[in-house]
Amino acid sequence: MATDAEVTAAVAGKLSSTNLVVDRTITAGGTTGAQTINKAAGTVNFAIGSVSLVVTNSLVTANSIIVCTTRTDDLNAFVWSIVAAAGSFTVNLSAPPEVEVSVGFLVTN
């Protein structure tokens, strides 16, 4: 079984008996479009009408597993796909949002 220190190093955060804390960047509301976030987790914001957004992230490889979820209610837009590449990933929405939409992500390797 891995020690807490080994798990902490693996997730770039810390592990306790009840919480997993991962280093992250939360993008402020009103800041939309492509972002550079070199952390295992974070959020980005889609502008009204935008369906694709690139996140530059030095932790990402073409084989990374990236989990994303919308954090804002919008009747049209939800995360459709996430495409990983070396050093970045693209988040694609199902349809253009009618409001600014926040998307949260978590990267694993």
Image (cartoon, rainbow, N blue to C red):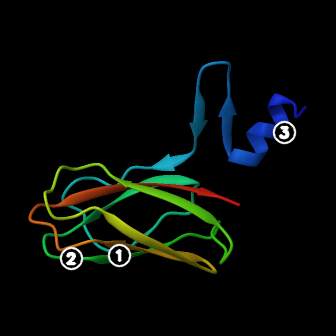
Question: In this figure, which residue is indicated by the disc labeled 3?
Answer: 6
Q: Relative to 108, does residue 9 appear above or below in the rendering?
A: above
Q: Nearer the viewer, residue 1 or 35?
A: 1
Q: Secondary structure at mark 2?
A: loop
Question: In this figure, which residue is indicated by the disc labeled 1?
Answer: 53
Dot 1 and dot 2 residues touching (CB under 8 Å): yes
Residue type, numbered disc 2: Ser
Answer with the quarter of the image where residue 102 lies: bottom left
Residue type, numbered disc 3: Glu
> Which sits earlier in the primary sequence, circle 3 or circle 1?
3
Within 10 angstroms of label 1, few (less than 14), some, or many (20 or more) residues?
Answer: many
In the rendered image, residue 104, in percent from the top left (x then y), is placed at 40, 53
- Quadrant where the image shows the N terminus: top right
Residue type, numbered disc 1: Leu
- The residue sitting at the left extreme is 98
In the rendered image, residue 11, in percent from the top left (x then y), is placed at 69, 46
Q: Is residue 43 left or right of residue 84?
A: left
Q: Relative to 103, does residue 50 appear above or below in the rendering?
A: below
Q: CA distance from mark 1 to mark 2?
A: 8 Å
Question: In this figure, which residue is indicated by the disc labeled 2?
Answer: 50
Answer with the quarter of the image where residue 29 lies: bottom left
Which residue is painted at 64% across and 81% down in the image?
86
Q: Secondary structure at mark 1?
A: strand
